[in-house]
Amino acid sequence: MVAPDFVHARVPDVCLVLEGTYPYVAGGVSSWVHDIVRSLPELQFSLLHIGPRLGAYGEPRYEIPPNVTQMVEHYLHDSVEAHDMLHREQLRARLDRRIRSARRETAAPSRALAAIRRLHLDSVVDDALIADLATGDLDVEQLLHGNTAFETITEIYRECAPGASFLDFFWHFRSMHVPLVRLLGAELPSAQVYHSLSTGYAGVLAAVASKRTGRPMVLTEHGIYARERELELARAPWIAERTRDPRMPTTSVSPLRRVWSRFFSRLAQIAYRQSQTIITLSEVNRRKQLSDGAARDRTSIIPNGVDIDHLSAIIGEPAPRGAQEPLRVGFVGRVVPIKDVLTFIKACHIALRDVKLAVEIIGPTDEDPVYAARCQNLVDRLGRSEEIRFVGPKKLADIYGKLDVVVLTSFSEGQPLVILEAHAVGVPAIATDVGACREMLEGRDGEDKALGPSGLVTQVAAQEATAAALVRFARDPELRRRMSVAARARVRAHYTKAKMIDDYRALYDELVR
Amino acid sequence: MRRPDTRVVIAVVLNAVTWSEAIVCPQILGLTLVVQLLTGVAIVSVIRHERQALGAAVAIAMPIIGPLATAWLDHQRGLGGGGLLGEPAEPEQTVDGADVARRLVSCPPPCEAIVSGDIDSRRAAIARLADRANADDIAILRWARTQADPDVAVEAALALEDIGERFDQRIAAARAIAKQDSTAEHHAAIVQAIADGVIAGFIDAATAGKLPAAARAHHDMAVLLDPALISSLAVPLARLELATDHAHDALALLEPVLATAAPLTEDVVELYNEAAYAARRFDLLTSLERQLAAVAKEEAGGRA
C-alpha cells in the first residue's frame, strides 16, 4: 500500500526497510531512524514499513520529516477476510479459480519455491538463492494448494522435522512462509540504496529489492534479530514439545523449534549475503554477526550517538544531592519483561535495607499491562510504595537532571540510548552485561578503557549484585564523581551524534553515486 | 480380519430361510418374526459393545439384510455406536520403560547439558527444569544464571522469569477465586500456592515481602471457616515459616498437630524436629532425635 499524499519528485536516495518500528512504535530504533532522516536533509528517503497486520498500530508516533518522499506499507498477516467480509462469495470464487489454476501448474516450476526448499535443506545461502527469491513467482495459493509446493513441504518435513506431527509442521510452515511469499510478491519502491534496520522479513525484502534493481543494500542491526527470535522461540508455548511429561528426560528441543530457529537464521544469512555493508553498534554484536555468517570484510561498527550540546542545554547540570538525601535512582524505559523491571525492584528493595534510595521507574506501562501490574504488585508486596514510584513517561529535560544513577536490568539490549543520554550529562549507570553495555561502561579498546569505568556491570537477573552496586554508589560519592567524569568523557570521545551522522552521510554518498 | 461367529452364521441362515418360506407361506409369519427377534439377540450378543444398540435396531428391524448388515458392520473400522455420544476418554498415559532407560542413558545430567555447548541439549535441559520447577530445578537454574556464557545466563534467567510469572498467575487466580467465594478451601489454596513458591525456593526470604503475612492471614481465615483444616494447612505454612526464618512460628503451628490424637506422619515429625533445631529448642526434639543428640554428645565428650 503506497500512501498517496507523498510527492514523487525523483527516485528516493535511500529506502529504509523497517519491521515493526518507525514511525508507529516508539523506542531506540525508531528514535535512531528519526534522527538519521532529520539529520540528512540533503537526501530523500522512502520508508518501507512491514507491520503485522493492517490497523495493528495506531497513529504514527513521530512526525514524518519532509525529506521522506514516499511511504509504503506491507503486512505479514494481511488477511483477506479482514477487508472483505462483505464480498466473501466473490472472494471464495476467486480463490477457487486460483486454486484450480495453481493445481494445473503446467508452467515451469516456481524458482521462489525452489529457493524456499533450499532455505531449509541446503547449508549454503548464495546469490542464486536470493535471485530465485527475487523472482517472486509464487503466490500464497500456489504455496498452500499447489501439488509441487505440497511435495516440497513434505520433503522439508521429512528432512527437518520427522519427529513432529505433520499437521503441526504444516501450520508452522504456513506461518513462516505465507508472510514471506506475500512480501516477495509485493511491489517495492525504487531507491538508490536499500537500507534495512534488521534481518528477518525486513532483511529479506531489502535483499530482494536490491537484487531486482541492482542497487546496493546496507544492513544496520541494533540488536541481533535472529538471536532475539531464538530466545523467544526457546520459550514459545505455541510450539508443541514431543513430550509434555517433564519427568521424561530428553536431549533435544522440539524439531519445530529448530525449524523456526533455522528459518530466521537463514533469513539473516540472506541479508548478510546481499548487504554491501553490514553495520552494528558494538564489537559484541559484530562478533555475533560474524558467527552467524556475515563476511568479516563487510562488517563495521557505527555506534549510536547523542547530541551532547542539545542534551546539556535542555537538561542542564544535575541538581546536587544533599548529604542526607537518598540516592536518586532511575529506571528509564518501557515496563516490559525484556527489561526485567522485577529484578530492578527486588534489587532496590534489598539495597533499601542498607541505604536510602529514592527510586523512579520512568517509562510507559501500557505496552504490557499485565507485566506492569506484576511490577506494581511486587512493589506493594515488598512494602516499598513510598521509595519506589512508577512515574510514567517524562520529557527528556525532566529525567536525568534529577538522577544520581540510572539502572538497566535488561535481558537483552543493543546499545541503549538511555546510557548515552545519562552519560552525556554525567550520570553514571549500572547495567547488565548484555549487548554493548559493558563496552559503554568500561570502554571498548585501550584508549577508551583508559578513561576509566563510567558505571558498574552486573549479570542478568542478579538482584543481589545490582543491590550491592546501588549500595556502593550510595556510600561512595567519590566513586560517583569519578564515574560521572568518565561518562562525559566517553560520550564526547566515542558517542556523538555528529560522528554517527557523518559516518552514515559518507556511507550513503559512496553508495548513492 | 476376525472370522464370523458360528452362532451369527446359523442365525443369519435361519433368518433367510424362514423369511423365504414366509413369502410363499404367510401362515408361518409369526414364527418368522420370532426367528427375526432371536437372530437379532444372537447377533447383538457377539458384536462389539459400542455397536450393540445400533446392531440390535438394524438386525431386528430389517428382514434378512438387517442381520447381514450388522454382521458386516461389526467387521468395519471406526468407533460408531453410542460411544460417540459420550465424552471422549482421556488417553491412557503409558510409560515405555525401555524408552525411559534409553533416554536416561543418553541424557546428560542437567548441569552438564547446560554447560555442554550444545544449544539443543542446553535448551532442552532448561525447558525441562522450567516445566518441572521443583526446588532442585530452581537451584540449578539459579546456578546456570551465574554462568559466564551470557547465552546460558540469559536463557536461565528467562526460564526463572517464566516460573515467576506462573507463580504470580497462580496466586492471582487463587486470590480472585477466594474473593468471589470465600470458602475454607479457597483460602487454603492461597496458602498452598504461596507456600509452594517459597518452599521451592523461587521466592527467597529477602524478597518474600508481605507474602508470608498474606499466607498467615489466609491460613487463619481457612481454619476459622473449617477448623478441620488445621492439621493439613499447618504443614505447608510451617515449611513457609521455616523458609523465611520464622522457626518459632513454625513450632507454634505444628504443636497443635502433634497434640491431636490422629496418627502422626513421618513428614510432620521431621518438620517439627527441623523447626526445633532451627529455633535452638533442643528440648523439644522427639525421642529419636534426643537419642541421636545424646549419642553425639557422648561422642563429643569422649573426644574431649
Image (cartoon, coloured by chain):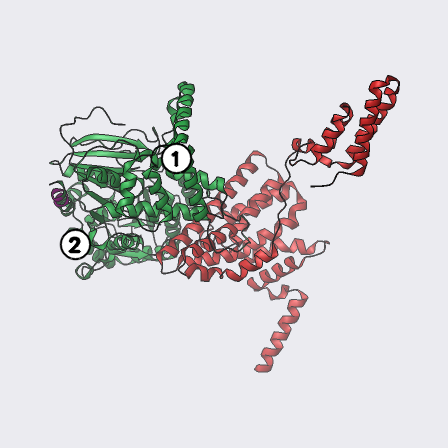
Chain colours: A green, B red
Is A507 magenta? The answer is yes
Q: Earlier in the sequence, mark 1 or mark 2?
A: 1
The CA distance from mark 1 to mark 2 is: 56 Å
Q: Which element type, helix, strand or loop, lies under badge 2?
A: helix
Residue A168 horizontal side relative to residue B253, left or right: left
> Where, quadrant-wise, is the C terminus of chain B in this rendering?
bottom right
Whether residue A26 is visible to the viewer of this picture, yes or no, is no
Tell which subunit mark 1 falls on.
A
Type of the residue with mark 2? Ala
Q: Which quadrant holds residue A271?
A: top left
Circle number at residue B186: none
Question: Which x, y percent locates residue A80?
Answer: 38, 26
Whether residue A73 is visible to the viewer of this picture, yes or no, is yes
> Where, quadrant-wise, is the N terminus of chain B in this rendering?
top right
Question: Which x, y percent locates residue A474?
Answer: 30, 55
Residue A207 horizontal side relative to residue B43, left or right: left
Residue density around tag 1, few if under 14, some if 14–19, many if 20 or more, within 10 Å:
many
Is B245 magenta? The answer is no
Q: Which quadrant holds residue B6?
A: top right
Frontmost residue, A171 versus A383: A171
Q: What stretch is highlighted in magenta?
A: A505-510
Q: Are marks 1 and 2 on the same chain?
A: yes
Which one is in front in this view, the residue at disc 1 or the one at disc 2? 1
Residue A205 horizontal side relative to residue B227, left or right: left
Type of the residue with mark 1? Leu
Seen in the picture, residue A477 relative to A181 is either above or below; the reply is: below
Q: Which element type, helix, strand or loop, lies under badge 1?
A: helix
Question: Which x, y percent locates residue A68?
Answer: 18, 32
Residue ID for mark 1 = A143
Tell which subunit mark 2 falls on.
A
Residue ID for mark 2 = A489
Considering the whole magenta stretch, tell me its main secondary structure.
Answer: helix
